Image (cartoon, rainbow, N blue to C red):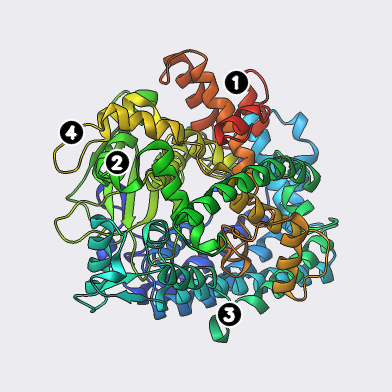
Amino acid sequence: MTSPASPIFDWTGPLGLPEFARIADADFAPAFETALAEHDADIQAIATNAEAPGFTNTVEALELAGDKLSKVSSLFWNRAGTDTNDVIQALERDIAPRMSRHYSKIAMNRELFERVDSLYQKRAEIGLTPEQHRLLERVWKSFIKSGAALDQAGQKRLAEVGETLAGLGAKFGQNVLADEKDWLLLLDDGADLEGLSDDLRATMAAVAEDLDHKGKYAVTLSRSIIEPFLSTSDRRDLRETAFKAWIARGSNGGETDNTALISQIVALRTEKATLLGYDSYAAYKLDDTMAKTPEAVEELLGNVWTRAIEHADADRTELAKLIAEEGANHEVAAWDWRYYAEKLKARRFDFSEAELKPYFPLSGMIEACFDVAHRLFGITMKERTDISGPHKDARVFEVRGRDGDMIATFIADYFARPSKRSGAWMSGMRSQHKLTMPDGSTGELPIITNVMNFAKPAAGQEALLSLNDARTLFHEFGHALHGMLSDVTYPSLAGTSVSRDFVELPSQLYEHWLTVPEILEKHARHYKTGEPIPRALLDKVLAAQTFNAGFAAVEFTASALVDMAWHTAGDKTDPATFEAETLKKLGMPEAIVMRHASPHFLHVFSGEGYSAGYYSYMWSEVLDADAFAAFEETGDPFHPETAEKLMTHVYSAGGSRDPADLYEAFRGRMPDATAMLEKRGLA
């Protein structure tokens, strides 16, 4: 067994961090053994407490239980996501179902549930604060949704289902990573590179060299390489090869094929929902959200879908004209859309992504992120180059509030690598709270991470971002602010601990400030000359924001509608057929594919987080467009009083109140979809 002195449990370094360099892969397994045993003991002590159930000795005690398990879990899942290997993946396959089994056992602890239930039944009589009432309600509901009210046979089966799902989800994600890692298209100088910018060529050369192919140029399935390649390569044959590999992740046959896993996952989720008394898994997942029902989700998505198809059809006609002008004799294929859309944008707005990228160096966009946060919320970010992060590329920042006091630690890991899963995300290594700790100290400050997959430049070179990359940076930093600005009493209500269709509000809202002219004028500067982005180019960028709106809306909305279809009625025994038939019913354009086809739909199948919940990005988009309109109505994108209300009721409030109440407290009313449709160019 690992002793308490394990580096995994010692978080006494600078800024309250562990010494990441001391943590070996072999440390995790014994650390989990220790942490799981101690959490079991904590839970048993709460459940068998001889004193009458009280909020402090039951609900607050649950909040503080399992400190070591929280530590080892946060460190392990960070490594599994950002720097995995065979040892970590083997442990992941083992620990995911074990953790599910562990938490199922807690949820089905009869003595523990009776204590929570006794408090819940008399909640109006025991003098709770609004935040305590909210926490008790959420704890009680989590027990119910985890099977606490089922009979013994039902609880046993539910635990088995949860354990199996955890293992299948881990395997699904590992399969996608394996397909991404194993595929490589090596190109030679000359004709292979026609159309590609110097920046993209340099990045592809650096990646090839890192993979021991010096002198070649590597196309990988990292979004930061594949998307600009598909947008600019003049070689249609190479675009087709790369595109087909990209959309085939998780469906290539053999050991990494996810098709069979999808059937198993969907069937088990349906069984879980049925055991808990829901009509469908979607109904189960939406029960505690703003949307509430699958019908409400489908109404929003259906409204957007109709408009998106109309715009996409019109855009396809324009792209077909370009193809004909070039003397080519082919339809608009899926591997053509981005390429000809880029040409059409250049013609319509007289600029290209290649012209834009030199003004979006990563360093400048990071400064822009931090500057917006300072203007809105008064926070300052200071990089601590003297402190090592969890990977050599990770950067550590101390975060201070308006009064100069420390409020959080921020860790940013920006670059793609073969050992990192694709995508971008925020996570919390530690949540903020104000409870009295066992050692007598009060509360803990949050430790928040942002993970990206930007293409890493050659040594000494600047990473240049596309406009979409810059939006991703702002998006994830918006999530990070939600965690770092948290100001609640209880960790289970801190930061992003909100309903799935509210959690994207702070992130998507933050994206709006990227294109505020005064931010671009200050921070969008040429990486070589330092000259600000020319006003004429800036005007073109702003005018083009809704360009290709139909394509973007179709690829997203199709994914969200298919996600809902998987988790409502229908025969899912043949996943490929089910997905194809669902898209056919929708009238999916042949030249556009889902943003995430089911075999690599990590949001939905690698865990339960966004399952029956991918719609939440668009639901939150209704909120974020309306929320930014609150600033626009004042004529000041950094209006102090509006920013203060935003911080109080959104960024610092966590899950301390119902999300609808929080939004209404900020805006004075609930939103409608008009601002979102206008923002997307679909009105």
Side of 439 relative to 135 (left or right): left
**Numbered disc 2: secondary structure:** helix
Gap between marks 2 and 1 measured at Cα: 29 Å
Quadrant for the N terminus in the image: bottom left
Toward the viewer: 567 or 648?
567
Q: Taking the image as drawn, is residue 446 in sight?
A: no
Q: Position of residue 9 (x, y in %)?
A: 37, 61
**What amino acid is labelled 1 in the image?**
Arg
Gap between marks 2 and 3 measured at Cα: 38 Å
Q: Which numbered tag is attached to residue 473?
A: none
Cβ atoms at labels 2 and 3 below 8 Å apart? no
Does label 1 or label 4 sit earlier along the sequence? 4
Instruction: Relative to 587, say whether 23 is above or below.
Output: below
Q: Which numbered tag is attached to residue 257?
A: 3
Toward the viewer: 41 or 525?
525
**What amino acid is labelled 3 in the image?**
Asp
Identify which residue is drawn at 54% across, 68% down: 247
Does label 2 or label 4 sit earlier along the sequence? 2
Q: Position of residue 610 (x, y in %)?
A: 62, 54
**What amino acid is labelled 2 in the image?**
Ile
Cβ atoms at labels 3 and 4 below 8 Å apart? no
Q: Which residue is mark 2?
A: 366
Name which quarter of the figure residue 681 lies in: top right
Instruction: Relative to 481, say whether 672 is above or below.
Output: above
Q: Taking the image as drawn, is residue 316 in sight?
A: yes
**What amino acid is labelled 4 in the image?**
Glu
Does label 3 or label 4 sit earlier along the sequence? 3
